[in-house]
Image (tube, rainbow, N blue to C red):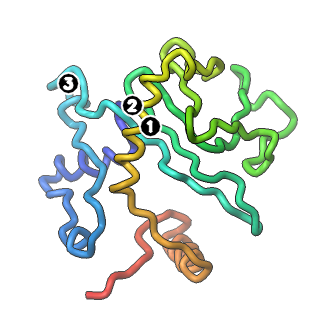
Amino acid sequence: YIHMCDWYATFCALAGVDPKDEKAATAGFPAIDSVNMWPLLSGKVQSGPRTEIPLSVDFKLTGHGTTFAVNSSALIQGEWKLLLGQQIQTYHQGPAFPNASNYGVMTDRSLQKHCGERLGCLYNIRSDPTEQNNVVLEHRDIASKMRNRLNELRKTQFQMPSDKSQKDQCLDQVRENGNFYGPWITTQD
């Protein structure tokens, strides 16, 4: 597997730059979750060092004064994908996209799947790539190991407390960057 965050460490390695951020570490931020994938991409090795992809850990979607998803987590390990909590936009498209006269809206509660926190939803993404068959009852041991891994990931996750002024600062920086996200929080030196 290659995660989008791996491009950072890969480009740093190609440029001969250390990807560690000592200033962030000193401020108490967790280490980056980026892996140099150049050996895999260049063909020097046949398999990459990453065996899992945390897609989200306790994601919370809010908007218009409403919370739409709470504690939504998703983890891929090998051929398995575990979903916990409320999942948004859980509709399935056909082979031609778009194949409908309208798109699903992220906040439409009829398009949400409730996987719960205790068991979750477990899919074998190799044999069931469209995630139609929840096999959590048949593979409780795998789901349990993946839930434990999500608990480990929660310990190192950094989530910036958010308030309206920070959201405004973020959007101002996005506009200043030509509609691209980038760093927008300053630290006290």
Residue 158 higher or lower than 46, as above or below: below
Q: Nearer the viewer, residue 162 or 100?
A: 162
Mark 1 or mark 3, which is nearer the start of the sequence?
A: 3
Count of marks, rendered view: 3
The percent position of residue 21, horizontal first and vertical second, equals: 22, 65
The percent position of residue 42, horizontal first and vertical second, equals: 21, 29
Label 1: few (<14), some or many (≥20) within 10 Å? many
Residue topped by disc 3: 43
Q: CA distance from mark 3 to mark 1?
A: 33 Å
**Side of 63 relative to 118 (left or right):** right
Residue drawn where x is 24% and y is 45% of the image: 10
Report which quarter residue 28 is drawn in: bottom left
Residue topped by disc 2: 145
Which residue in the rendered view is the most extreme toward the top?
Answer: 127
Label 2: few (<14), some or many (≥20) within 10 Å? few
Residue 2 higher or lower than 61, as above or below: above
Residue drawn where x is 24% and y is 49% of the image: 9
Residue 99 higher or lower than 178, as above or below: above
Residue drawn where x is 30% and y is 50% of the image: 33
Residue topped by disc 1: 147
